[in-house]
Image (cartoon, rainbow, N blue to C red):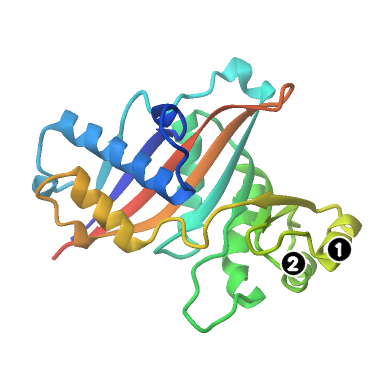
Amino acid sequence: MQEKCKCGVGSEGSPFRNERPKSIGGLVRDCIQKTLTEWSSKIGQDLNQEILEVLECTVAQAIEKINPEERDELKVSAKLFIVGSNSSSIRDAVDLACSALGVAQLDSVIIAPPPIEDGTSLSLEYLQPYWQELENLVQNKKIVAIGTSDLDKTLLEQLYLWAQVKPNSNQVNLASCCVMPPDLTAFAKQFDIQLLTHNDPKELLCEASFQEVLQESIQNTKAHEWIPLWLLRYSVIVKSRGIIKSKGYIIQAKRNAS
């Protein structure tokens, strides 16, 4: 039997304003744990008793839907981290984000480098199915603009030349690169690609970490049967002021049970 759990996690900052700053990975763990704990206390039943194919692990007040009258004043951006699934999950992630936030499309989506096996390097061939899924969503008007993360100049150029929908941005992790590489900067300027910085860890949420949080949050659940598929971080930004109105996470996990 397979079940899927869609966990909507609210603002990443508000529950923790009076605590010491946490790492991004620690913040994600805290958000997931808080949501699962609150959700499980409200449903008042053991997850092992569930026979549904999809479990909606959402706290009603965790994610604020966008007022349609304010939509034109806001920019809705997302970064997608693929954890234990393939390119087919990209559409699920975007659809769930749109539904949760009450919008028809996302203004921009950046995809983090998909997981690769140890000893192998990220290549254009590996990226292509993921990018094609994003292109389909752009063509179907679910996303306005798409971007990449942690691509060097060579790989970004390969993707740009191959892609039908060109990347409009590329994030660079300054933890491994304190200065933007000159060749990357020159290429991005030539083709009008925005270079952004980020400090996300290479692995934001691993399978073991998710299972540990699940075990701590919900009693009597077989945490080892659950595998996180993807994690999406969203931000809602007021265009005229450049401030973040809300931000949070949405995660999907799958349970493999015999």
Residue 202, compared with residue 220, is above or below; it is below
Residue 211 higher or lower than 246, as above or below: below
Secondary element at tag 1: helix
Q: Is residue 44 left or right of residue 227?
A: left
Looking at the picture, does residue 9 appear above or below residue 216? above
Q: Percent position (x, y) of residue 257?
A: 17, 62
- Mark 1, Cα crowd under 10 Å, few <14 / some 14-19 / many 20+, is some
Q: Earlier in the sequence, mark 1 or mark 2?
A: 2
Q: Amino acid at mark 1?
A: Phe
Question: CB under 8 Å between callouts 1 and 2?
Answer: yes
Identify which residue, 94 or 120, lies in the foreground: 120
Residue 195: x %, y % from top left: 76, 52
Identify the residue at horizontal 43%, vertical 55% (top origin): 230
**The N terminus, quarter of image:** bottom left
Q: Which residue is mark 1?
A: 187
Number of the label disc, if any, that sits on residue 156: 2
